[in-house]
Image (cartoon, rainbow, N blue to C red):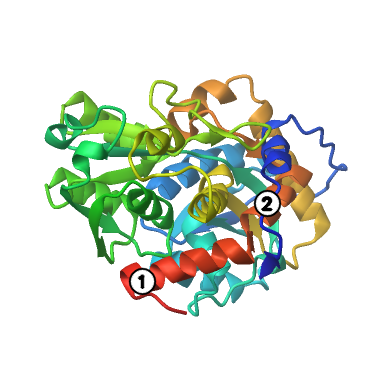
Amino acid sequence: MKQYNSTRIGFGGFAASLLASVAFAPPAVAQDFTDMTVEYVIPFSESGGSAAWANFYAPLMSEALPGNPTVVVRYRPGAGSTEGANWFQNNQDTTNGTLVFGTSGSTQFPYLLGDPRVRYEYDDWKVVLASGTGGVVYLPPDLAEMFDGDFDALQGESFLYGSQGATSLDLVPLLSFKMLGLQVDPVFGIEGRGDGRLMFERGEANIDYQTTPAYLANVTPLVDQGIAVPVFTFGALDDEGNIGRDPTFPDLPSFKEVCEATEGCETEGLAWDAWKAFFVSGFAAQKMIYLPGGTPQEIIDAYTAAFEEIKARPDFAEISEETLGIYSQATGQAAIRASDQATTITDEAKQYVLDWLEEDYAVTF
């Protein structure tokens, strides 16, 4: 696991690497996947944002990879996604390009925190795509009426939140809720964010968040029906590493704006630094596609060329907006840099979060 002793992470360089247009010209490849089946494994259930992301890319990969293989999405949920990641680590001998693995922030976070369930090592894998994304927090209408840009009037309310676990991607919203002074009781144990949404729909939870793909696909209808009201996004990074509004939801305030407006919430200091570090790992480079580490370079090049071809489609912006939102899809060296940043943490940020997890949720490693 990679750690830095400095108190800062190079957010600006990372954001630039994701948002800049990267010129990449892979060498010609003779790889051919004709009559082959590629298993695209994700460590989540079929109801969440990772499933929407994987099922968006799978048919496009089939079209773009040489030989047009069948690409099938497989689901291996469990243990906050660590079960599926451990499985992939143990299947590194599948090096013919027929196995790819899709991670999420819920996979990165346990790795960063030293979770004992982690038996996987990102440095052993070969990244071919890094997808940025966003997240939206929403409330039922009665509570949303009390939100006017800050959470001051909601700090005395009791909230229930369906969670995959304190060290999953839910770390970012849970830390957000704490910084905002909200009284949120998480119900741990759900297998995917889609299950958290279902709890909200059934009235078993009264606060929830979904990543952009799942929000656009599954929560927008709830908003249209008056069941859910979005209140803020986690935001997006600009080229200088500053957090601004999410480009997919420009009319919603970012967490930074809401924090600045809410009594007791501060956008500087150790809590903010820790939140921002996990935001980068969980959202700015949240979802990545990896091949096993021993995969030959010509197969890695074939996948890189395929994703470059997908991004270059004239209709890519149109077909991807509903599922992916307006975020960077990094390949080549940009994807490698994104993977490195998303799996690296400062000692100070790590310790702050470890102390908070132990104090609030009795989670220790």
Density class for disc 1 (Cα within 10 Å; few <14, some 14-19, many ≥20) is: few
Residue 322: x percent and y percent? 43, 28
- Residue drawn where x is 50% and y is 75% of the image: 115
- Of the pair 243 and 189, the residue shown nearer to us: 243
Q: CA distance from mark 1 to mark 2?
A: 26 Å
Q: Secondary structure at mark 2?
A: loop
**Image: 205 above or below 241:** below
* Within-10-Å neighbours for mark 2: few <14, some 14–19, many 20+: some
Count numbered badges in the picture. Answer: 2
- Which residue bears the numbered disc 2? 9
Query: In front here: 335 or 238?
Result: 238
In x, y percent, where is residue 298? 82, 53
Residue highlighted by disc 1: 359
- Give the quarter of the image for residue 94: bottom right
Q: Is residue 282 visible?
A: yes
N-terminal of the pair, mark 1 or mark 2, is: 2
> In which quadrant of the rendered view does residue 164 lie?
bottom left
Type of amino acid at the residue the image marks with label 2: Ile
On screen, residue 312 versus residue 84, left or right, reads: right
